[in-house]
Amino acid sequence: MKIGLIFPNKDRKDKTVHLGLGYLASYARSIHDDIEITIIDKRVATKKEAKQFFNNSYDLIGITVLSTVYHEVIDIFISK
């Protein structure tokens, strides 16, 4: 199973690390050997990395949403 996880925070004033996605990926891998998880952090990803991420085919996409990045999340799903 291929899972893509997205942390959309490219426009936030205060940059933060989202440990929750890392913990989620680590836990899933510890109980399922056949899972392939890719995490993209939009604040540090290059355009090439973002394009590569969104051109992949995933069985499941997870996205963390804070109210401050709500519009960015909508843009991600409308433009992809």
Image (cartoon, rainbow, N blue to C red):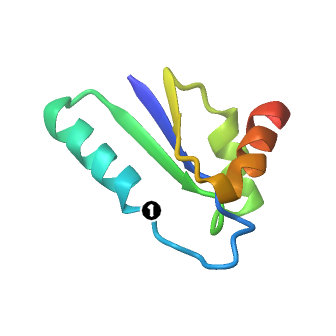
Disc 1 residue crowd, few under 14, some 14–19, many 20+, Cα 10 Å: few
- Quadrant in which residue 48 is drawn: bottom right
Left/right of residue 79 with respect to residue 13 in the rendered view: right
- At x 65%, y 61%, the residue is 9
Q: In this view, does 61 lie above or below 37?
A: above
Question: Residue 12, position in %: x, y?
Answer: 69, 70
Q: Which residue lies furthest to the front in this view?
A: 67
Label 1: state its secondary structure: loop
Q: Residue furthest left?
A: 31
Quadrant where the N terminus sits is: top left
State the residue in front, 58 or 69: 69
- Quadrant in which residue 56 is drawn: top right
- At x 37%, y 35%, the residue is 36
Callout 1, which amino acid? Answer: His
Q: In this view, does 48 lie above or below 75?
A: below
Left/right of residue 73 with respect to residue 14 in the rendered view: right
Q: Is residue 40 above or below residue 1?
A: below
- Residue marked by disc 1: 18
- At x 44%, y 62%, the residue is 18
Question: Residue 78, position in %: x, y?
Answer: 82, 32
Question: Residue 61, position in %: x, y?
Answer: 53, 31
Question: Residue 72, position in %: x, y?
Answer: 76, 50
Quadrant where the C terminus sits is: top right
Q: Is residue 5 above or below residue 49?
A: above
